[in-house]
Image (cartoon, helix red, strand yellow):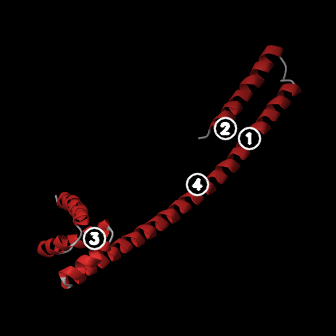
């Protein structure tokens, strides 16, 4: 029950008491002035109640709109997440395909290409290859680049081992 409803009920309970008190004190009926002020107060409270009901209805509509927007946002978020996951899977598939390609190449040819490649990409490709092929290619490429790739392989290898636990 709203505070306004409680106030109206209290007012309706108080009015007879006021009328009775006025009659008891003056040995006459309540003055028209006190009745008019009570009627005005009751009317003001009724208007206030109507205003609060309107606001409550507006708030309910806004709440419904918020819930609908939250649902749309969740749907959009899910779509983005699914698309992102698909892109990741495609990239992983591409890396796996590259690993197969470089595994089938002659080691010196593969080394020439990998040497020009970004260290992160080379690391991802090597993680999909057999260790003996990686070793042969690393022996051919620039030693500085080989050290970078080996360091990343060690770190990525640790990540893979931790994820498997």
User: Dot 4, crowdedness within 10 Å: few (<14), some or many (≥20)?
Assistant: few
Is disc 1 placed on a helix, strand or loop? helix
Circle number at residue 122: 3
Mark 2 lies on residue: 4
- The spot of residue 64 in percent (x, y) is 58, 58
- The spot of residue 46 in percent (x, y) is 74, 41
N-terminal-most mark, 4 or 3 = 4
Is residue 130 shown above or below 158?
below
Identify which residue, 58 or 159, lies in the foreground. 159
- The spot of residue 144 in percent (x, y) is 25, 63
- The spot of residue 99 in percent (x, y) is 24, 78
Label 4 – label 1 distance at C-alpha: 22 Å
Q: Are marks 2 and 1 in contact (CB under 8 Å)?
A: yes
What is the quadrant of residue 82 in the picture? bottom left
N-terminal-most mark, 2 or 4 = 2
| Foreground tag (2 vs 4) | 4
Q: Are marks 2 and 3 in contact (CB under 8 Å)?
A: no
Which residue lies at the image location 24% right of the left edge and 64% below the top edge? Answer: 149
Q: With 126 as the anchor, is 25 left or right in this view?
A: right
Circle number at residue 63: 4
Identify which residue, 2 or 143, lies in the foreground. 143
User: Dot 1, crowdedness within 10 Å: few (<14), some or many (≥20)?
Assistant: few
Label 1 – label 3 distance at C-alpha: 72 Å
Is disc 3 placed on a helix, strand or loop? helix
Q: Are marks 4 and 1 in contact (CB under 8 Å)?
A: no
């Amino acid at each position: 029950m709203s505070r306004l409803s409680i106030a109206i009920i209290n007012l309706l309970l108080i009015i007879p008491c006021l009328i009775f008190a006025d009659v008891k004190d003056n040995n006459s009926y309540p003055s028209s002035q006190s009745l008019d002020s009570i009627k005005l107060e009751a009317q003001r409270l009724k208007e206030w109640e109507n205003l609060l009901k309107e606001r409550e209805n507006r708030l309910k509509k806004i709440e419904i709109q918020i819930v609908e927007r939250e649902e749309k946002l969740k749907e959009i978020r899910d779509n983005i997440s699914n698309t992102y996951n698909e892109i990741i899977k495609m990239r992983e598939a591409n890396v796996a395909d590259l690993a197969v390609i470089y595994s089938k190449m002659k080691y010196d040819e593969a080394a020439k290409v990998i040497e020009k490649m970004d260290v992160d990409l080379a690391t991802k490709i090597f993680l999909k290859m057999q260790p003996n092929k990686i070793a042969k290619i690393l022996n051919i490429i620039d030693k500085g680049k080989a050290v970078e790739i080996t360091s990343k392989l060690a770190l990525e290898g640790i990540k893979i081992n931790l994820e498997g636990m």
